[in-house]
Amino acid sequence: MTWWAVLAAGIGCYLLKLAGLSVPPRVLERPVVARIADLIPAALLAALVTVQVLAAPEGRALALDARAAALGVAVLLLLARAPFLVVVFGSAAVAALLRLL
Amino acid sequence: MTTQHDQRAVVRDSLGVAIATGTYGLSFGAVGVASGLDVAQTCVLSLLMFTGASQFALAGVLGAGGSAVSGALTALLLGTRNTLYGLRMAPLLGYRGWRRVAAAHVLIDESTAMAVNRPDREQARTGFWTTGLTIFVLWNLTTLVGAVAGEQIGDPRDLGLDAAVGAAFLALLWPRLSTPLARVTALLAALVAAGAVTLTPAGVPVLVAAGVAVLVGALAR
C-alpha cells in the first residue's frame, strides 16, 4: 500500500508540473482561483505543523510534549534567520535532550 | 542583450541557492525512514516526486498513522503550487516537446524563483536549469545518505526526529507568511486541524484544513 502511495503521488506530482507548463494560462485569470491556489500551501503546511507537533502518538487526541518545545526552538531559529538544516536538526536535538532529562 | 558576464552571474547565484537547498535532502532522508518508509521508498520519492514539501507531507502523514490515500492526497494538493509556477514559467522558457517534458521534472520552488525575474529567455533558462539540475543531483544524493544514516538509528524518537518533521514544515511555511491573508489562513488552518485531530482519523485533519484556504480565498476581497 505504501508503494502505491509513493508511486501514484510521485507520478501525480510530476503531471501537475507538466500541466502547468502545458495548459493555457487563462485558467489563472480568475482572481479567486489564483488567490485560493496561492493560499493552499500555507493552509496545508500550517495544518501539517499542528498535527505533527500536537497530535498524540496514540491518535485522536492532542498532547503537549517535547515536540512543542522543539517547535518553539524552531521559531526562534527561524527568527534568527538560521539555515533550514540548522532549524530542522536543532529542534530535533532539543526534543532529544528533553527526553533524556 | 545578455552578455557572458550576465550569464556567469546567473549561474553563480543559482548554484548558491541550489547547493544550500540540495542538502535539505539529508533531513528528508532521515525523516522518511523515521516515518516508516524504507530506504528505497524514500529514495524513489526524491527521484520521482522531487518536490520537497509534498515528500515531507507524504512521509509525515504516513508516519502519523494516516492512510496511503490521505498521504497521497496531501502530497498532490501541495504539488498544485508547481502547476502555478508552470503557468508563469511556460512563456519564459518557451519549450515544447521533450524539452518541456524534461523541464517539468525540475519545476520546483527554487528553479522558478531563480528564473522568473530574469530580463530575457536565455538568462531565465540558465537560472532554471542550473538551479533545477543541481538541486536534483544533490537532493537525491543527500536523501540516500540521510535515509541510510536514519536506518542505523534505533528509535527515531530518541534523536528527536519526530520533532524535526514539525520544524521542517514550519521552515517551509515561514517564507509563505509574508501577507496578512496568508497569516490568517495559516492560523485558521492550524486551529481547524487541531480540532479535527480529535474527531477524524490520522491524515484527514490536514485535508480538512485545505478547505480553509478555499474559504478564505473565496471570501477575501
Image: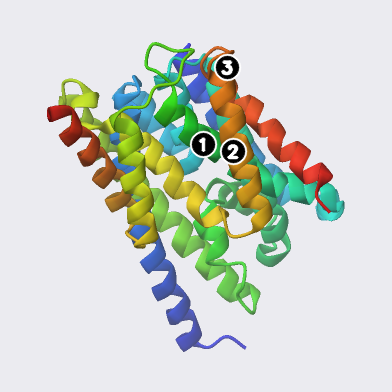
- Between discs 2 and 1, the one toward the N terminus: 1
Check residue B54 in the rendering and tell me which mark sits there, or answer none: 1
Residue to which mark 2 is pinned: B78
- Chain of the residue under label 1: B
Secondary structure under the numbered disc 1 in the rendered image: helix
Q: Colour mode? A: rainbow
The residue pinned by badge 3 equals B69
> Relative to B157, is A7 on the left or the right?
right
Query: Could you tell me which chain the residue with mark 2 belongs to?
Result: B
Q: Quadrant of the C terminus of chain A?
A: top left
| Chain letter of the residue beneath label 3 in the structure image | B
> Tag 2's secondary structure?
helix
Q: Is residue A37 left or right of residue B4?
A: right
> Label 2 neighbourhood size at 10 Å, few (<14), some (14-19), many (20+)?
many
Whether residue B75 is visible to the viewer of this picture, yes or no, is yes
Q: Are marks 2 and 1 in contact (CB under 8 Å)?
A: yes
How many angstroms separate mark 2 from mark 1 (CA)?
A: 6 Å
The amino acid pointed to by label 2 is Leu
Q: Is residue B140 above or below residue B155?
A: below
